Image (spheres, rainbow, N blue to C red):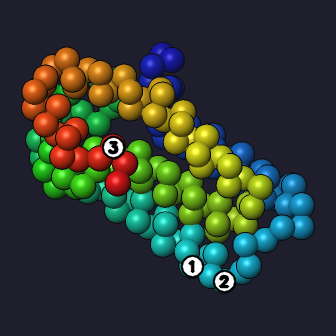
Amino acid sequence: MLKWIDIPPVWLAGAAALAWVQAARYPAGLSFGGAWADFAGGLLVGAGLVLMALALMELRRHRTTPIPHLEAERLVTSGIYKRSRNPIYLGDALILTGLILRWDAVLSLPLVPVFVWVIERRFILPEEDRLRRKFRMNFAQYCHKTRRWV
């Protein structure tokens, strides 16, 4: 049961909830400055959703799982995965950053690097370890050509 709760969207929802509460209850008189922050936040949320959609389509095309705790059937290195080894997690980070901008949650900005650190430790490193063991040389070559985030 905990494996199904311990997934990145739950961590993203938790971080977003903290940012929303901070913006609603503890704004501390700080602001990003209005319309430009709303626009930039919207762009970041949109970009995150597009990245996630492209990544999920590529995983589906290769018939492998997007669920972090499951074993991948194939090593996907095409499509958006040519640019980033973790486009879904990058999308999560963009969405969180965009929501923080949209909600004017200035004090929540430190949540972004904390979220990225948690995602890397809880999901990326174990996933990469499984991929390294299963795909050996192909994964090593992929890591050499493609950065973890951008």
Residue corresponding to mark 1: 39
- Residue 56 is at least partly visible in this image: no
Residue corresponding to mark 2: 35
Check disc 2 and report its element: helix, strand or loop: helix
Looking at the image, the residue that sits furthest to the bottom is 35
Relative image position of residue 1 (x, y in whole percent): 48, 16
Towards the viewer: 122 or 56: 122
Residue corresponding to mark 3: 148
The earlier-in-sequence mark between 3 and 1 is 1
Q: Is residue 25 left or right of residue 23?
A: right
Q: CA distance from mark 3 to mark 1?
A: 27 Å
Relative image position of residue 15 (x, y in whole percent): 63, 44
Towards the viewer: 66 or 142: 142
Instruction: Name the amino acid, label 2.
Output: Ala
Relative vertical location of residue 6 with respect to residue 116 in this rendering, above or below = above
Check contact, mark 2 vs mark 1: CB within 8 A. Answer: yes
Residue at image location 32% in from the left, 26% down from the top:
127
